[in-house]
Amino acid sequence: MSAKERQRLLVLSRVRDQGMSLKKAASVLRVSYRQARRIYKRYISEGDAGLAHKNRGKASGRGYTPQLKQSVLELYKTRYDGFGPTLAAEKLLEEDGIVVDHETLRRWLLAGGIWQRRRKRSTHRQRRIPKDHFGELVQMDGSPHWWFEDRGETSCLMNMVDDSTKTTLALMDKEETTELSMRLLWAWIDKYGIPEALYVDHKTVFVTDRKPTLEEQLRGDMPVTQFGRACRTLGIQIICASSPQAKGRVERNHGVYQERLVKELRLRGISSIEATNELLGKGFIEKLNAKFSVAPRDELDRHRPVDKKTELAAVFSFEYERTIANDYTVRFDRRLFQIVKQRALPLAKTKLTVQVRLDKSVHLIYQERELEFVEITKEVLNEQLKAVEEKPKPSTPNVPASDHPWRSQKWRNKLIGARR
């Protein structure tokens, strides 16, 4: 008997033996009085068996016949082996005209051992041991956050963390831009040297998925971003992480900054990016490194010094390719530059590189050599027009009139005789 039927047996036995009223029994069983009378009558006439459900042991009138079940399983084995229950139910209806609910088919297949659930397991991750040397791998990432709380808008803290020592360095700007990444890497190089590799994510600041241009294909170069070009020039390898967990060192370090820097800015009443960068550079980061950094397993520093011939201002810049016009002018960003006359002047219609440095200065580079130029502005054009207007006009030659004696034959004969 079920639990419900056992409860009915207990209550109805009290009605029979202990004088409990049928009305009260109906209230306890949560049925109507008329239904309680029917149940009690069947209990008195048939005993305990009268309380069991009459359909128990009988096949459901809406169930599938054993013959249909067997035919469906045979079709699945012969034609739809490997199909999921949902797809197999759809195919049985479309191809064979058999209507079977996909959940029913799932139970049949599981009971018959024909199909098994394919559970989606989580990706296995193995803990990566930190690098042995300082400068062998540096993780880099940006952290947009309400750094000023309700005192200002959101901004981004770009953070670099050494994988071996947990040494950190950070700068703040409005957004995670290429310029911010270049400035931070430049600051790291000035302080520690050139690291061997950078561990970053798949953002367009660091890597690009565009197809190579024809010129890049001819040179055999892969397309890179401006930041990637700077790293390639310095010999820094860029490694892209497949997930945030892969660069967990810098991700956890974001939490340190979000916990400590936000409160420090609140205590000092700082609400500007400039003041925050000044705070970071004047002791805040040194205190973090003194508290959280650890000694590397190997004391060898893998940072490389900057070559004396390498100008970091030229490395950390934005480079664009432009064509020299016939009048030796170069157009870039709605500006016009005039190449002045100099030694080893490049040919017209050849390409050069327009280099825009982080201080917004513009340089023209041709075959790794910087060209001299002047920018043609409105002031320069006005000065050139003024110089043309003030230039004295050339005197016109005095042409004799048509009846001038010099034109007569007598004067010509004298002239010929004098020449002889």
Image (cartoon, rainbow, N blue to C red):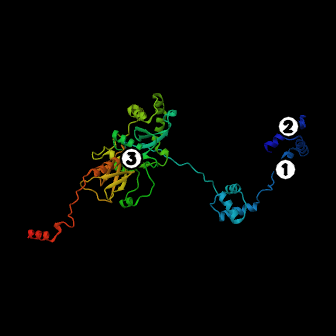
Secondary element at tag 3: strand
In this orientation, which residue lies closer to the viewer: 272 or 195? 272
Left or right of 110? Residue 20 is right
Foreground: 330 or 116?
330
Instruction: Name the disc covering residue 54, or none.
Output: 1
State the SS at label 1.
Answer: loop
Secondary structure type for disc 2 = helix
- Where residue 420 appears, as percent x and y from the top left, is 8, 70
Q: Amino acid at mark 3?
A: Ala
Report how far apart the C-alphas of labels 2 and 1 lie in the structure: 23 Å
Residue 105 circle label: none
Quadrant including the N terminus: top right
In primary-sequence order, the first of circles 3 and 2 is 2
Q: Is residue 1 above or below residue 81?
A: above
Q: Disc 2 marks which residue? A: 27
Kindly identify which residue carries mark 3.
Answer: 197
Name the amino acid type tagged 1.
Lys
Picture layout, residue 266 above or below residue 333: above
Residue drawn where x is 36% and y is 55% of the image: 322
Q: Amino acid at mark 2?
A: Ser
Q: Residue at x 45, y 28 (%)?
A: 268
Along the line of sight, the residue nearer the viewer: 352 or 396: 396
Q: For marks 3 and 2, give the one nearer the viewer.
A: 3
Q: Residues within 10 Å of mark 3 (few under 14, many from 20)?
A: some
Residue 42: name its quadrant.
top right
